[in-house]
Image (cartoon, rainbow, N blue to C red):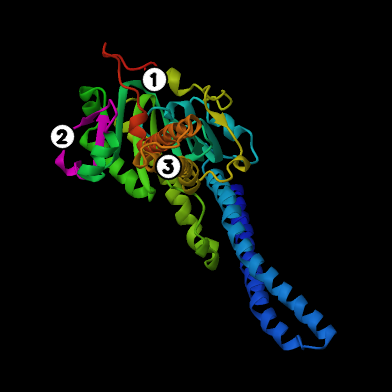
Amino acid sequence: MSAAAAGEASGLARLERRRRLTLRWALAAAALGLLCWPLALLLGEEGDETREMIGGAFVWLGVIGLIAGPWILRAWPRFMERHMLDAVARAWPEVSHLDGERDHRARAALGSDAFEIGAFQASGLAEPFASASVDHVLTGRSHGVPFALAQLRLLNQEGYRVFGGVLASFRLPRPRPGLTIVTRERGLLGNLIARTGSGIERVALEDPHFEGVFEAYGFDQVQARVVLTATMLERLKALDELAHAQGFTCAFRDQHLLIAFKGMRWRCALWRVLQPVRAWLPGYRAWLEELIALPARIVATLDLDAPAAAAGRPVSAAAPARPGVALVGSHNEVFSAGLWRLVGQGGMALVWIASGALFGGLAAAFGWWWWEAGFEGISGYFLFMILLGLAYGAGAISAGLYLLARLAWTWGAPLRGIPAPRSSGRLPDGLA
């Protein structure tokens, strides 16, 4: 047996031991939680202080068991995710796995030649973001193409999550002028809402077979059609089906093929703890390897073979990320998910509206009452307070409606973040 095969077998054995240990401890904790409470009722006899103390101890043991069981199960997929990605990297010499929590090179990889996180800004793949929190990075070469896939979360200026999933970047041997975006078909109304307010134009696909699958956008219709051939769209469709993500969007921009898999997680499902590792890990590895290899074949579809000098050029993994995108740790993401974003930004807007309606309504009610009374007995102070309440009510309601409108305008509509091209026909500086 070769050293690589022996190492792989040893890794599988270790993961299998961890799976069995996790399952045993989780079942033991569940049994503790389910059995201790009936025992507490049997042992806890009223009037007997010793038995009551024993019964109370069993109650607390049951609580600990019911808490520990789910916690043990939830920790297992996180452990498996890290070690499964390590196993994939060991089986693929040209690929490295960088742990965002333990390896500082994972953050540096987001500013390498293969992956520039700043390139995803204003590319129609995610809403505008100010910072990123990286979990795992797979980087290296696939079929000679430098690439990086990062499982991460993107946060806006307020610290709320605008994207969670996997971003992928594959470096093209030669740059493609302009910006061409391919996203899933959302229906007539969905497509209209997605591109309303954006300066980018819709690109009609020549093959009607893909009209019901993809929607394409670009600033240069001719260049977009050069890229979006039938073969290219066929491979993009295969990549979309392979990903099993909640969303799929890709962009051909400058020197990179950029891909966003919204909602994708490399963590295995919790129910896999019931299956031996050997029964499903090879399939997981094959899926992840194809997820890397298929975009590399898409680059080859562009018929952009790298010249010899570029092919031998090493990929820098330590270049700093583009300015404007801070890389933060996951501990800074408390209450950042989409629900908390809706509560935080939308809730504050509703507070402004409620406050304006309350004080403005009271001022309007008092003003109406004095108007009905012919303004008898009203002093200048009360008149001033009524006018101030009406002004505050109108201003607060307007501010709340503005915040709601801004949230609705940016929510899930990354195309609106693309700046319109200049009148001269040149792309904006951020896209040039």
Residue for badge 2: 206
* Disc 3 from disc 2: Cα separation: 66 Å
Rendered location of residue 212, percent (x, y) = 20, 45
Q: Are marks 3 and 2 in contact (CB under 8 Å)?
A: no
**Which element type, helix, strand or loop, lies under badge 3?**
helix
Name the amino acid type tagged 1.
Pro
Above or below: residue 101 compared with residue 226: below
Foreground: disc 1 or disc 3: 3
Residue for badge 3: 366
Foreground: disc 1 or disc 2: 2
The image shows a total of numbered marks equal to 3
Name the amino acid type tagged 2.
Glu
Out of 198 and 253, give the one closest to the viewer. 198
Rendered location of residue 321, percent (x, y) = 54, 25
State left or right for residue 111 relative to residue 261: right
Name the amino acid type tagged 3.
Phe
**Which element type, helix, strand or loop, lies under badge 1?**
loop
Q: Is residue 379 visible?
A: yes
